[in-house]
């Protein structure tokens, strides 16, 4: 099924699919084989892909439509109705900025803007190198630490614009050190 769908793409659409996305699509093609081919399976199928891969690739939606014999409009209708679904791959460093009431009052919106400027992406986007993804979330349950941000698994408390810079710098330094370590091991 995947090959057939890929064959319908023009060159620029094909070029936009990188290796990581292709691997996800191949996995989805296999996973769909275990999903009964009936329209009632639409939501469970999307949830399965979201859970396993962290997002719904555009072509995966076409595969779901074909597998369940529903229209692509139906698939997008469901996928956009529920806010549990993401359409961009999660970055290796997912950043979630809390904009629940307490964090909003303490300047969460400004923190989000700072991340957007620093990373050159908007909320719900992923950087081209897939290093970062950015999203706003509702209360994460630690209002006393507002404004709070979750970076990967770690909660960052009392975040200020200068702390935004510090968070990104720390990630970059870690990345640089890991690259050097790898180079050393390869020598
Ligand atoms: S509102 Fe941000 S942690 Fe509760």
Image: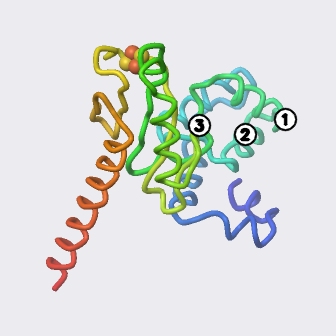
Which mark is in front, 3 or 2? 3
Which disc number belongs to residue 71? 1
Relative to residue 83, is residue 1 depicted above or below?
below
Instruction: Using the rendered view, name the quadrant where residue 124 is placed.
Output: top right
Mark 3 vs ligand 1: CB below 8 Å: no
Res. 140 in view: no
In this rendering, the count of numbered labels is 3
Instruction: Using the rendered view, name the quadrant where residue 152 is placed.
Output: top left
Mark 2 vs ligand 1: CB below 8 Å: no
Q: CA distance from mark 2 to mark 1?
A: 10 Å
For the point 30% across and 35% down, which residue is it?
A: 153
For the point 59% across and 37% down, which residue is it?
A: 86
> N-terminal of the two: label 3 or label 2?
2
Q: What is the quadrant of the C terminus in the image?
A: bottom left
Choose between 131 and 69: the one closer to the eye: 131
Choose between 122 and 64: the one closer to the eye: 122
Q: CA distance from mark 3 to mark 2?
A: 21 Å
Badge 3 is on which residue?
Answer: 86
For the point 76% across and 59% down, which residue is it?
A: 4
Q: Position of residue 166 (x, y in %)?
A: 29, 49
Q: Position of residue 162 (x, y in %)?
A: 34, 44
For the point 59% across and 31% down, which residue is it?
A: 85
Badge 2 is on which residue?
Answer: 67
Instruction: Using the rendered view, name the quadrant where residue 62 is placed.
Output: top right
Choose between 42 and 103: the one closer to the eye: 103
Which mark is in front, 2 or 1? 1
Relative to residue 164, is residue 159 depicted above or below?
above
For this orientation, the residue located farthest to the bottom is 187
């Amino acid at each position: 099924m995947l090959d057939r769908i890929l064959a319908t793409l023009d060159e620029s659409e094909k070029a936009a699919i990188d290796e990581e996305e292709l691997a996800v699509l191949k996995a989805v093609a296999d996973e769909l084989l275990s999903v009964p081919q009936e329209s009632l399976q639409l939501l469970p199928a999307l949830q399965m892909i979201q859970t396993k891969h962290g997002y719904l690739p555009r072509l995966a939606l076409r595969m779901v439509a074909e597998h369940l014999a529903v229209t692509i409009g139906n698939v997008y209708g469901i996928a956009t109705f529920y806010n549990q679904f993401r359409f961009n791959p999660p970055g290796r460093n997912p950043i979630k900025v809390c904009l629940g009431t307490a964090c909003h009052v303490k300047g969460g919106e400004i923190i989000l803007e700072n991340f957007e400027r620093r990373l050159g992406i908007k909320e719900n986007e992923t950087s081209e190198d897939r290093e970062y993804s950015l999203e706003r979330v509702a209360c994460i349950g630690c209002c006393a630490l507002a404004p709070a941000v979750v970076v990967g698994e770690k909660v960052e408390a009392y975040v200020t614009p200068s702390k935004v810079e510090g968070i990104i710098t720390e990630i970059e330094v870690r990345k640089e050190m890991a690259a050097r370590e790898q180079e050393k091991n390869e020598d």
